[in-house]
Image (tube, rainbow, N blue to C red):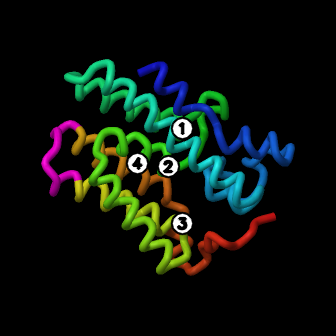
Amino acid sequence: MLVTYFIGAIPSGYLIAQRLRGIDIREHGSGNPGATNVYRVVGKKAGLLTLALDVLKGFLPVLFVRFVYPREAGTAALCGLTAIAGHNWSPFLNFKGGKGVATSGGVFLALLPIPTIASVAAFGLTVKKTKHISAGSLAAAVTLPMAAFIIPTIQLYRFAAVVVGIVVILKHKSNIQRLREGTEPRYDEKKD
């Protein structure tokens, strides 16, 4: 769990922005070190690279744990949760971080592939309709636990999906407010 926490805590977006532009991404755009802000501030390739790395730091450790401990569903779930916690509250960024959407996607791709695919579809459809990444993230956060309860799976994974869905929604509190006010930026809007 400690190892997966520190893997999750690697601040991909911060490191990419630092390397490519020499900037602290937390001082630009929304101030979030996640893929959306990196996309807006640094560029499309940097944003997509951040997204891929954030997904992988959730997916690979949990897949490894499932392979090494195939009968330990609880261990896999806890390692997934600690990877997400590392991303959201990184010790490398003074215990601040992203909102956990991409890393959660990676974790649940390893734990619950079919519900995760359903949540990615909900994300994509919502973003296409609204042009807001945050709205897509919220749709995915709601869809994942719902799909986990529809498709037969391990009860513990369902519980983890509910917990993560709630955390993602809470981390989007300011986005929800801006969506309600009509001031949330679209994904294709550039920031400083």
Mark 4 or mark 3, which is nearer to you? Answer: 3
Residue placed under numbered mark 3 in the picture:
133
Which amino acid does the dot numbered 1 rest on?
His
Mark 1 or mark 4, which is nearer to you? Answer: 1
Q: Does residue 153 sit above or below 144 in this rendering?
A: above
Which amino acid does the dot numbered 3 rest on?
Ile
Mark 2 or mark 3: whose residue is earlier in sequence: 2
- Front position in the image: 9 or 175: 9
Q: Which residue is found at the position 28% from the left and 45% from the top? A: 112
Mark 4 or mark 3: whose residue is earlier in sequence: 3
Estimate how packed mark 4 is, as few (under 14), some (14 to 19) or many (20 or more) residues with alpha carbons within 10 Å: some
Residue placed under numbered mark 4 in the picture:
167
Residue 175 image offset from top left, x and y in percent? 54, 65
Determine whether, in the image, residue 95 is placed left or right of residue 21: left
Estimate how packed mark 1 is, as few (under 14), some (14 to 19) or many (20 or more) residues with alpha carbons within 10 Å: many
- Tell me the CA gap for discs 3 and 1: 18 Å
Query: Mark number for residue 87?
Result: 1
Q: Which residues are magenta?
A: 148-156
Query: Mark number for residue 102?
Result: 2
Please check the rendered image and state whether residue 153 is part of the magenta-colored stretch, yes or no.
yes
Mark 2 or mark 1, which is nearer to you? Answer: 2
Instruction: Find numbered disc 1 in the image and state the secondary structure of the residue it sits on.
Output: helix
